[in-house]
Image (cartoon, rainbow, N blue to C red):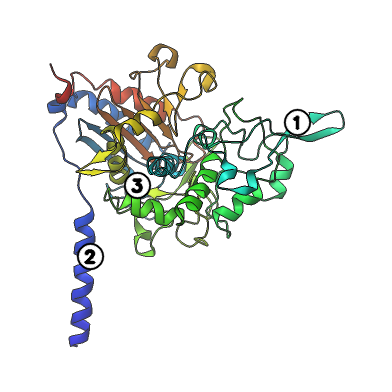
């Protein structure tokens, strides 16, 4: 009996300690940070209307300004069939929102002098010494040598010429079991997978085109090689634990299974249906092989944890007295590195982010210098240094069909700004 009590006390102590690590974000009424509470109701009404019509299952919207949580709202169900409501601590598959975290991991190593943007990837991953590029020849597909080495900067900016296996050599990529962004079901570690990938013909010459693909997964393998740690261990000890991101993981602990939101898919005729098990549907984030740490699309997180990560970036690399990056490193990450290669110059692209350089060219509400990205599961985030703003929209919908709510989310956030953030007030 005494032994049982001792075990129970130890377990409760562990739970209390874990809860203490879950640092809450400071809150403020919208009107105190230059946001209109009445205008934020437009955001809530728009999301709720789509939930009510059955266009989307469940959503969390979160807006921070000047470091204060001014809006966080839950809508719909985390699991419709089980009647589980969406909660503020619901966990989401964040897919390509993982890229920002892996990019920060690489820049941490850059600050330590262990990486340089100009490093050839082959310096760290020898399989990339002689890469080939697919081209159309008279007799069909040919592979020609790359004109130059792929660099770390190429990986961070998606200018390495590497897609998700959908280019001219798509058949070869498919035969190699490397097609599409989803890697969490793979039974081999990311380093071995990337070594196999290096032998396949790529889609374009390095530096000549912006092509979205396995670049950040390769970068994750570089982080592993340089740090001599798994990517899981590196981001956990160097990013998640310092920032108190207690619910960010590559693979979800079994005891958190019930907090993982269900994925839904848009039906062609309208409405949604539960996505299939496994793969990019419900995924392998709990019961999968737990072997391949996909830096490009493999993480799960809560809204609050991801907000802490983004607030760190907005603060110039620091949060709650913990500094992950220097301000100049964040400046480097959020500058345009690709000229006019991305979106025909309507936007820039930095070291892991889409960058707004000119609001007229971008054609949407925002500010010069704002940056962000999205997720295959229809989530999106935006960081606006000029407005001291962090905005997150999290859901689990793939495919999303013709739904345009994600794009309207940005407008619905920006229209709620009616005054300067206190730190910018005259």
Give SS at disc 2: helix
Q: Are marks 2 and 1 in contact (CB under 8 Å)?
A: no
- Residue 277: percent from left, percent from top: 52, 55
Residue sitting at x 45%, y 34%: 352
- In-image side of 384 versus 344 (left or right): left
Q: CA gap, disc 2 to disc 1? A: 57 Å
Q: Residues within 10 Å of mark 2 (few under 14, many from 20)?
A: few
Q: Which tag is nearer the camera, tag 2 or tag 1?
A: 1
In this rendering, is residue 373 above or below 362? Answer: below
**Residue at the extreme bottom:** 1
In this rendering, is residue 281 above or below 70? Answer: below
Q: Earlier in the sequence, mark 2 or mark 1?
A: 2
Q: Which tag is nearer the camera, tag 1 or tag 3?
A: 1
Q: Earlier in the sequence, mark 1 or mark 3?
A: 3
Q: Which tag is nearer the camera, tag 3 or tag 2?
A: 2
- The residue identified by callout 2 is 15
- Residue 249: percent from left, percent from top: 39, 54
Give SS at disc 1: strand
Q: Residues within 10 Å of mark 3 (few under 14, many from 20)?
A: many
Q: Residues within 10 Å of mark 1 (few under 14, many from 20)?
A: some
- The residue identified by callout 1 is 135
- In-image side of 178 versus 393 (left or right): right
- The residue identified by callout 3 is 77
Q: Is residue 275 visible?
A: no
- Residue 72: percent from left, percent from top: 24, 38
Assign the C terminus to one quadrant of the image: top left
- In-image side of 331 versus 297 (left or right): left
- Residue 229: percent from left, percent from top: 45, 57
Residue sitting at x 42%, y 15%: 363
**Residue at the extreme front:** 113
């Amino acid at each position: 009996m005494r032994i049982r009590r001792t075990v129970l006390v130890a377990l409760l102590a562990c739970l209390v300690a874990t809860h203490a690590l879950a640092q809450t974000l400071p809150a403020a009424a919208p009107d105190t940070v230059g946001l209109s509470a009445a205008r934020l109701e437009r955001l809530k009404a728009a999301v709720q209307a789509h939930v009510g019509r059955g266009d989307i299952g469940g959503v969390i919207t979160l807006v921070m300004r000047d470091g204060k949580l001014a809006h966080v709202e839950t809508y719909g169900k985390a699991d419709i069939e089980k009647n589980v409501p969406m909660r503020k601590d619901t966990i989401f598959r964040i897919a390509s929102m993982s890229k920002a975290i892996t990019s920060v991991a690489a820049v941490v190593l850059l600050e330590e002098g262990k990486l340089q943007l100009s490093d050839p990837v082959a310096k760290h991953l020898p399989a990339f010494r002689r890469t080939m590029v697919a081209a159309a020849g008279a007799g069909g597909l040919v592979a020609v040598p790359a004109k130059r080495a792929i660099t770390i900067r190429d990986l961070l900016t998606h200018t390495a010429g590497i897609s998700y296996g959908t280019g001219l050599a798509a058949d070869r990529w498919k035969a190699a079991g490397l097609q599409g962004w989803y890697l969490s079901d793979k039974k081999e570690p990311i380093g071995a997978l990337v070594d196999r990938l290096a032998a396949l013909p790529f889609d374009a010459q390095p530096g000549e085109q912006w092509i979205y693909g396995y670049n950040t997964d390769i970068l994750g393998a570089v982080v592993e090689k340089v740090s001599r740690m798994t990517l899981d261990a590196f981001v956990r000890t160097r990013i998640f634990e310092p920032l108190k991101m207690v619910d960010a993981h590559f693979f979800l602990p079994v005891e958190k299974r019930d907090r993982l939101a269900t994925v839904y898919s848009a039906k062609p005729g309208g409405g949604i249906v539960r996505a299939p098990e496994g793969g990019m549907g419900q995924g392998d984030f709990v019961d999968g092989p737990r072997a391949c740490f996909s830096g490009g699309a493999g993480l799960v997180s809560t809204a609050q944890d991801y907000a802490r990560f983004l607030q760190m970036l907005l603060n110039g690399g620091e949060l709650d007295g913990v500094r992950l990056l220097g301000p100049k490193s964040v400046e480097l990450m959020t500058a345009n590195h690709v000229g006019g290669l991305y979106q025909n110059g309507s936007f820039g692209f930095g070291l892991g982010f889409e960058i707004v350089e000119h609001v007229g060219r971008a054609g949407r509400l925002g500010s010069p210098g704002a940056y962000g990205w999205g997720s295959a599961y229809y989530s999106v985030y935006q960081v606006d240094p000029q407005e001291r703003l962090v905005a997150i929209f999290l859901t689990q919908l793939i495919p999303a069909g013709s739904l345009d709510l994600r794009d309207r989310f940005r407008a619905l956030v920006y229209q709620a700004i009616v005054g300067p953030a206190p730190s910018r007030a005259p």
